[in-house]
Image (spheres, rainbow, N blue to C red):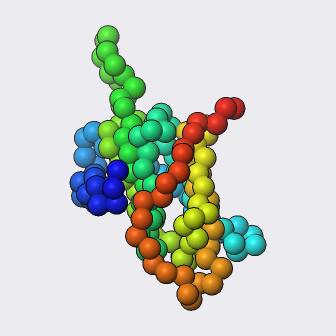
């Protein structure tokens, strides 16, 4: 997928997320923190039930984008649905990064429904270029 294709897809998914929650989509919860040594930004995104191949991660300047799709969990219903709170469908999340990052050193792990992205903070924050690129990484489900 090219850079332009990724952001076209992201814009399509993200465009409906700013207003009221729409049927068939959701915005995942996330936590972000800087490690004690100040060298790495860690972003954890709650994506239970999402297949790793449906997750896309990109950085544009000081913004981290996470997008993808979660398939419905109920395939065929028998009886009456009493409660439906788990969102499915397309999702998108945009996170403003507090500092430029070293894009070549970014890594991600998907374990127990949590996507953990490690973003090393640029060593020379003043000279770090703003690069617009989709991050190339393999996101694998880790065994328990």
Residue, x 51% and y 71% (percent of image)?
Answer: 97
Name, please, the residue furthest toward the front. Answer: 2
Residue, x 55% and y 77% (percent of image)?
Answer: 99
Could you tell whether 1 is left or right of 111 in the image?
left
Could you tell whether 95 is left or right of 126 in the image?
left
Report x, y in % for residue 1. 35, 50
Name, please, the residue furthest toward the bottom. Answer: 126
* Towards the viewer: 21 or 130: 130
Residue 79 vertical placement versus 98 (above, below): above
Residue 8 vertical placement versus 68 (above, below): below
Could you tell whether 6 is left or right of 37 in the image?
left
Residue, x 54% and y 67% (percent of image)?
Answer: 103
Residue 100 vertical placement versus 73 (above, below): below
Residue 87 in sight in this render: no
* Towards the viewer: 56 or 112: 56
Residue 93 in sight in this render: yes
Name, please, the residue furthest toward the right. Answer: 37
Report x, y in % for residue 44. 57, 54
Report x, y in % for residue 133. 42, 65
Report x, y in % for residue 82. 35, 24
Where does the C terminus fall, quadrant-wise?
Answer: top right
Residue 128 vertical placement versus 108 (above, below): below
* Towards the viewer: 32 or 118: 118
Q: Quadrant of residue 85?
A: top left
* Towards the viewer: 5 or 29: 5
Could you tell whether 106 is left or right of 57 in the image?
right
Q: How many marks?
A: 0
Residue, x 32% and y 39% (percent of image)?
Answer: 89
Q: Quadrant of residue 102?
A: bottom right
């Amino acid at each position: 997928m090219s850079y332009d294709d990724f952001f076209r897809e992201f814009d399509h998914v993200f465009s409906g997320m700013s207003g009221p929650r729409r049927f068939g989509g959701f915005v995942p919860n996330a936590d972000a923190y800087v490690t004690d040594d100040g060298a790495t930004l860690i972003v954890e995104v709650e994506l239970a039930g999402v297949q790793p191949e449906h997750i896309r991660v990109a950085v544009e300047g000081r913004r981290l984008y996470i997008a993808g799709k979660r398939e419905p969990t109920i395939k065929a219903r028998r009886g009456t649905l009493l409660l439906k709170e788990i969102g499915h469908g397309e999702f998108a999340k945009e996170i403003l990064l507090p500092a430029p990052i070293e894009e070549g050193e970014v890594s991600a792990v998907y374990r127990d429904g949590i996507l953990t992205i490690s973003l090393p903070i640029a060593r020379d924050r003043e000279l770090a270029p703003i690069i617009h690129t989709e991050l190339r990484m393999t996101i694998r489900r880790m065994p328990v």
